[in-house]
Amino acid sequence: MGFNIEELIMTVGYAGIFGIVFAESGLLFGFIFPGDSLLLTAGILASRNYLNIWYLIPLCIVAAIAGDSVGYWIGRKTGPKIFCREDSLFFHKKNLVKAQEFYEKHGGKTIILARFMPFIRTFAPIVAGVGEMKYARFLFFNIFGGIFWVLLMSLVGYFIGAKVPGADKYLHFLILGVIFVSVLPSVIHVWKEYRYEILKKLKDQISRTKSKGFKI
């Protein structure tokens, strides 16, 4: 990470935290923000009484759900033409395509699973809107995923900060560890669904490499 997330949180306060979680949850440029690490670090700071955990959790839940809802309506209003948009500094079509492929494979569950997958998290609600998922169904997955994501990340940070002396010294490693653990169920789920396709592509790639005279 190229900046200090603790300093960022202390500078922007609750309003800034809300804005970052909101943007990262559904705005096209939101993928640039550190959603998982932000919540984890905010939880650690709450354990030191720099933030109030009872304010932090509801605030972030509302931000996450509202952000996804805005993303959904962006996708619903723009429709498929959003896939024709040119790449820019804050928009990369490949991320949208990845989210679409994930959504086509997993349907409504994508809204929950994507909460723990950077990049896909931002674009999943937009793709759901483009695909015209019924809003009531989308909202169910959105609320469940938003609550689960915020609770897990912030409370893990809170308890680490309360129980691990000098947790801030190992913050980067803790963030990576928590993100890995949180993403693992989604990775396992994707592997079960795609494993035959992945293995087939790998086998085909090895065969093409051998045919070109390279030794494996």
Image (tube, rainbow, N blue to C red):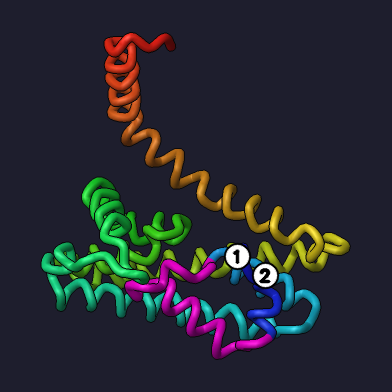
Q: Residue furthest front?
A: 213
The amino acid type found where label 1 is placed reads Ser
Observer-nearest of 178 and 62: 178
Give coordinates of residue 75: x percent, y percent: 21, 72
Name the quadrant containing residue 120: bottom left
Q: What is the span of residues highlighted in magenta in the rendered image?
A: 11-35
- How far, Cα to Cα, is label 2 from label 1? 6 Å
Position of residue 86 in the picture relative to residue 79 (left or right): right
| Helix, strand or loop for disc 1 | helix
Observer-nearest of 116 and 37: 37
Q: Main secondary structure of the magenta part?
A: helix
The amino acid type found where label 2 is placed reads Thr
Observer-nearest of 143 and 104: 104
Rate crowding at label 2 as few (under 14), some (14 to 19) or many (20 or more) other CA atoms within 10 Å: many
The residue shown at (26%, 73%) is 72
Relative to 73, say whether 142 is above or below. above
* Image disc number at residue 37: 1
The residue shown at (73%, 70%) is 44
